[in-house]
Amino acid sequence: MNGFMTFLGKELTEIRKTWRIWVIPGLLVFFAITSPIIAAVTPALLGSISKSQPGVVMKLPPPTWRESYAQYLKSLSQMVLIAVVITGAGAVSGERSSGTAILTLTKPVSRRAFVLAKIVSQGCLLVAATVVGTVICAALSRAIFGPSPLGPLVASVSIWTIDALLMIVVMTFFSSMFAARGASAGAGLGFFFVSLLISIWPVANRYSFVGLASASGKALMQQPTGAAWPVVIAVVAGVLCAWAATRVFEKQEL
């Protein structure tokens, strides 16, 4: 893989100096801050609604750290994953359409190094932003709700991170396959929603990567997750998808 470390350094520098440093990290920090607040004010909001509607009574138990963590995890599983799809759509296709891929590959950088550096740089950004967001969510939950155990949050977010990293690899594959960013995004969104539908099937939910979402929720509830098979299959799928992305890109005309 000629030029991998050099190109990876270039990608990490570009992330720091462009809009990419704000999108995923910005969303994670935003949801980390708002999730404890939403969990704290939701009972009061529902109570005020019930008072304005004669005959309607809504009584909710006092919110706890669990509601705060659940709100954060819900945002990660929906909005942040969709953002990963959209931002990852142009990882390779964007450079192809702008012509920068040709300039890069005329230097001693192999196509395999080009694709893998894209995956690694995006993964580093996601993991770093997830750590920061999770720390903020835990700190605010503790400030609002009192002592809040870290174990359930760390376990559930760790499982979600595996799912998000797999999505990064999948999006790099689609971005290598399609020359247009819109086509890559469409394929990624299709993959995301089809995965949600397949997860309804108990067998797929137990023995494939689509079960990562439910395993993450179970970890938050401190229940047995059954995450072994979903994690193993996700890792295998990620490796195969990364290999496929490099093979597809090596055959593409720039």
Image: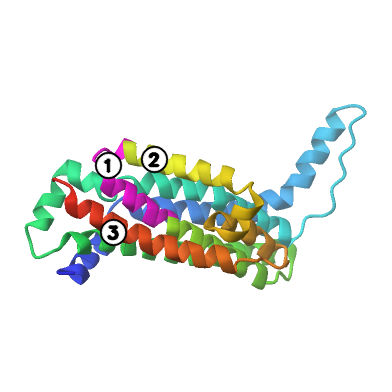
Q: Amino acid at mark 3?
A: Lys
Tag 3 residue: 118
Between discs 1 and 3, the one toward the N terminus:
3
Query: CA separation, marks 1 and 2?
Result: 9 Å
Secondary structure, mark 3, is helix
Residue 187, disc: 2
Q: Residue at x 84, y 48 (%)?
A: 60
Question: Where are the magenta residues, as a range?
Answer: 167-182
Seen from the viewer's position, the closer of residues 253 and 14 is 253
State the quadrant of the N terminus.
bottom left
| Residue 209 x/y as whole percent | 53, 58
* Vertical side of 31 occupied by 143: above or below: below
The residue positioned farthest toward the front in the image shown: 203
**Where residue 181 sits in the image (x, y, percent)?**
29, 39
The alpha-carbon separation of the residues under discs 1 and 3 comes to 16 Å
Above-or-below relation of 22 to 181: below
Assess disc 3: are there few (<14), some (14-19) or many (≥20) residues with their C-alpha within 10 Å of its C-alpha. Answer: many
Point 65% across, 66% down: residue: 226
- Which residue lies most toward the top here? 54
> Disc 1 residue type?
Phe
Alpha-carbon span between mark 3 and mark 2:
18 Å
In the rendered structure, the answer to whether residue 111 lies left or right of residue 212 reads left
Towards the viewer: 28 or 157: 157
Q: Are marks 1 and 2 in contact (CB under 8 Å)?
A: yes
